[in-house]
């Protein structure tokens, strides 16, 4: 008996239905953590990269992917952990950024991940840093960082000084 | 030792085993028999240092002076434990005797630990915690940056991943050193005291031995002596901005952690960290 395997495109479509456990408005493909999907014989291989190395959601994400694909009839699935290249917030899709904003999380601003840490620090301490994080509620640019860490490792805590809304900013790495 | 990860549920163990079988980055160092003892030791030095600092940092969870600080400490601890899983996971793979990152963390005694002495010292007050984090981050950031060019692709990819997180660790700890040093009389005094306390433990970060030399010869990592000039420059600059005085006595360095000779503090850390797996072997939830 031969079984017909679904196309890789079809699998990507199914993966787009698996929500991130901590930010359920976006999917694992929106987040850009699914790096590759292919068949090895009858076994589907899904390569996933962690967002943060200690992210406790990774084990849950693996299980969510396996169980969702099982509902589509795919039972022979292997998850590969891929470290390289390391995940960057630049991989979050445009569509997902809008979903994040609607959900009350300011999306990451590309290209602002710290590389030269001491230069970035000097710019910030001297007040010349130009990182503007707009309030997801009222759109105002008058916001301030409360803490580099928010409700999850990937977010920083901000507040809007116009509408006074506290909010999370998806920080760049 | 045959037991797999004791802390995980069955399905997670199964996934981990599948992942371990699928390490598809070719790296001849991992199976190099002659290099094995040094490579294993060096990987334990990396992983044990992040593990013990991660544990010390996690001690603030629920005790932070402000909610934001509490969350920040817990998040940094989480990053460091994440790095530990990668370093000790690779160490176990190199050793190839059936151990895992979990059994290395939970079932070794103090003399088998290879962490820097600096990270096992008690967390002290917030000044000691922040000053230690800064002195370590400045070294860690530079070291990981160099390791991204390692001749071992496995080491390089772990370093590249960890570096992203350590970049914001350093940013945060250096900001706080400046804010607390150049702060009130009380905060400045505490930061200066913390610096005097920790300074003798910084020398160990820059002393190579035969393990480091074997690793350097294989092109896996630079000699730690080579990190000293840049570290000194960073630390001097930040401490100056923080209005703190660089301790004068640099001749004497406390060392031994990287070869398994520890302070009395490590045993207490392990007693707490390993208790569950020692008392209830194989326990999971």
Image (spheres, coloured by chain):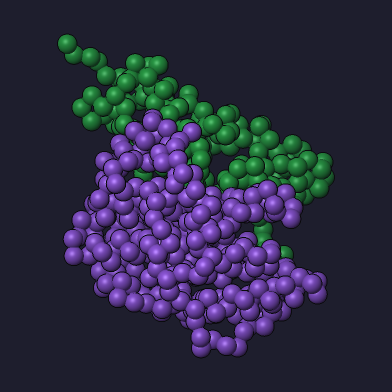
Does A135 sit left or right of B12 as displayed?
right
Where residue B263 appears, as percent x and y from the top left, is: 50, 70
Q: Is residue A40 above or below residue A173?
A: above
Is any part of residue A34 visible from this angle? no
Q: Position of residue B64 (x, y in %)?
A: 70, 53
Q: What is chain B's hue in the picture?
A: purple
Number of marks in the rendered image: 0
Please tell me whether residue B3 is drawn above or below residue A27 in the rendered image.
below
Residue drawn where x is 51% and y is 86% of the image: B252
State the residue lying farthest toward the top: A1
Residue beneath the point at 68% across and 67% down:
B127
The location of residue A2, given as percent across then percent down, is 18, 13
The front one of B63 and B27 is B63
Q: Is residue B135 visible?
A: yes
The part of the image, by quadrant, that contains residue A81 is: top left
- Horizontally, residue A173 falls left or right of residue B109, namely right
Q: Residue at x 61, y 54 (%)?
A: B59
Q: Nearer the viewer, residue B134 or B219?
A: B134
Quarter of the image holding residue A71? top left
Q: Which chain is green?
A: A
Which residue is at 54% across, 65% downward? B265
Residue B195: horizontal and vertical position, in percent?
63, 76
Determine the residue located farthest toward the front in the rendered image.
Answer: B279
């Amino acid at each position: 008996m031969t079984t017909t395997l679904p196309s890789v495109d079809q699998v990507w479509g199914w993966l787009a239905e698996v929500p991130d456990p901590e930010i359920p408005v976006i999917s694992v493909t929106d987040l850009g953590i699914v790096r590759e999907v292919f068949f090895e014989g009858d076994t589907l291989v899904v390569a996933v990269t962690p967002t943060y190395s200690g992210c406790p959601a990774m084990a849950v994400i693996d299980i969510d992917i396996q169980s969702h694909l099982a509902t589509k009839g795919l039972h022979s699935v292997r998850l590969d952990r891929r470290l390289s290249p390391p995940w960057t917030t630049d991989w979050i899709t445009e569509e997902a950024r809008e979903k994040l904003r609607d959900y009350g999380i300011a999306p990451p601003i590309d290209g602002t991940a710290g590389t030269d840490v001491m230069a970035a620090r000097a710019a910030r301490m001297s007040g010349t840093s130009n990182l503007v994080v707009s309030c997801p509620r009222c759109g105002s640019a008058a916001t301030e960082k409360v803490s580099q860490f928010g409700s999850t490792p990937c977010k920083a805590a901000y507040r809007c000084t116009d509408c006074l809304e506290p909010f999370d900013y998806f920080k760049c790495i | 030792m045959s037991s797999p990860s004791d802390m995980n549920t069955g399905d997670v163990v199964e996934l981990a085993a599948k992942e371990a079988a699928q390490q598809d980055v070719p790296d001849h160092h991992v199976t190099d028999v002659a290099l094995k003892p040094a490579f294993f030791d060096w990987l334990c030095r990396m992983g044990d240092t992040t593990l013990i600092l991660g544990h010390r940092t996690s001690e603030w969870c629920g005790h932070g002076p402000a909610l934001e600080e509490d969350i920040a400490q817990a998040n940094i601890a989480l990053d460091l434990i994440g790095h530990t899983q990668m370093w000790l996971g690779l160490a176990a793979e190199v050793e190839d005797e059936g151990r895992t990152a979990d059994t290395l963390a939970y079932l070794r005694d103090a003399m088998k630990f290879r962490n820097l002495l600096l990270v096992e010292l008690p967390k002290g007050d917030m000044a000691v915690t922040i000053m230690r984090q800064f002195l370590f981050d400045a070294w860690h950031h530079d070291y990981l940056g160099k390791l991204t060019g390692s001749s071992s692709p496995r080491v390089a990819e772990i370093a590249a991943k960890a570096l992203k997180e350590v970049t914001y660790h350093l940013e945060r700890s250096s900001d706080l050193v400046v804010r607390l040093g150049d702060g009130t009389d009380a905060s400045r005094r505490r930061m200066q005291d913390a610096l005097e306390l920790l300074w003798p433990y910084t020398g160990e970060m820059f002393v190579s031995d035969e393990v480091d030399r074997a690793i350097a010869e294989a092109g896996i990592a630079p000699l730690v002596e080579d990190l000293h000039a840049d570290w000194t420059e960073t630390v001097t600059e930040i401490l100056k901005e923080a209005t703190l005085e660089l301790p004068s006595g640099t001749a004497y360095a406390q060392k031994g952690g990287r070869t398994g000779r520890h302070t009395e503090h490590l045993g207490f850390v392990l007693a707490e960290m390993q208790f569950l797996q020692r008392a209830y072997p194989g326990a999971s939830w």
